[in-house]
């Protein structure tokens, strides 16, 4: 089952924030990572989350560097946020959608 990105999905944003908060990160870090992850997802909203790749992340970081002309510090924040998204948030989202589809099948 694929989960197309819906950047207006409050549950997705909540999952991102909850995942970050569970790591006991500072609130400012949670807000910063959430911001960059949301922007990444917005730019890739036509692609299912499961199909987002390292190339998509590289393209986004290039966008941050070249189009947004972000400082090195902001580029590093964006990169760290994407690393977190791919290593923690996306697997949790996949687990959540798998659990939901299994519940629907057993109902």
Image: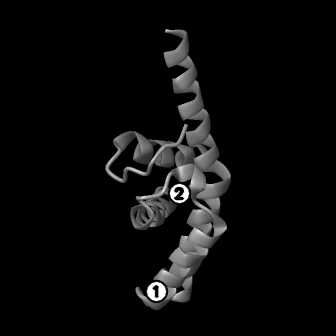
Asked whether the viewer can see residue 23, the reply is no
Mark 2 Cα-neighbour bin, 10 Å: few <14, some 14–19, many ≥20:
few
Q: Could you tell whether 4 is left or right of 88 in the image? A: left
Query: Pointers 2 and 1 in contact (CB under 8 A)?
Result: no
Q: Closer to the N terminus: mark 2 or mark 1?
A: 2
Q: Residue furthest left?
A: 8
> Which residue is tagged 2?
26
Up/down of 11 relative to 65, above or below: above
Disc 2 and disc 1: Cα gap in Å? 22 Å
Q: Position of residue 107 (x, y in %)?
A: 49, 9
Asked whether the viewer can see residue 107, the reply is yes
Q: Position of residue 37 (x, y in %)?
A: 48, 61
Q: How many numbered circles does the render carry?
A: 2
Q: Residue at x 58, y 70 (%)?
A: 57
Mark 1 Cα-neighbour bin, 10 Å: few <14, some 14–19, many ≥20:
some
Q: Residue at x 49, y 48 (%)?
A: 16
* Front position in the image: 26 or 91: 91
Up/down of 105 relative to 78, above or below: above
* Front position in the image: 6 or 83: 6
Determine the secondary structure under disc 2: loop
Q: How is the image coloured?
A: one colour
Determine the secondary structure under disc 1: loop
Residue 72 location, quadrant: bottom right
The N terminus lies in quadrant: top right
Q: Nearer the viewer, mark 2 or mark 1?
A: 1
Residue 85 location, quadrant: bottom right
Q: Residue at x 54, y 33 (%)?
A: 97
Q: Could you tell whether 94 is left or right of 64 in the image? A: right
Q: Position of residue 68 (x, y in %)?
A: 41, 86
Q: Which mark is residue 44?
A: none
Q: Which mark is residue 70?
A: 1
Q: Position of residue 49 (x, y in %)?
A: 53, 52
């Amino acid at each position: 089952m694929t989960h197309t990105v819906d950047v207006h999905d409050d549950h997705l944003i909540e999952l991102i924030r909850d995942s970050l908060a569970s790591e006991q990160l500072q609130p400012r870090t949670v807000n910063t990572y959430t911001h960059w992850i949301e922007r990444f997802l917005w730019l890739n909203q036509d692609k299912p989350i499961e199909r987002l790749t390292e190339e998509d992340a590289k393209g986004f970081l290039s966008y941050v560097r070249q189009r947004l002309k972000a400082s090195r510090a902001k580029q590093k924040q964006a990169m760290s946020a994407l690393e977190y998204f791919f290593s923690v948030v996306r697997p949790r989202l996949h687990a959540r959608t798998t659990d939901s589809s299994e519940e629907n099948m057993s109902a």
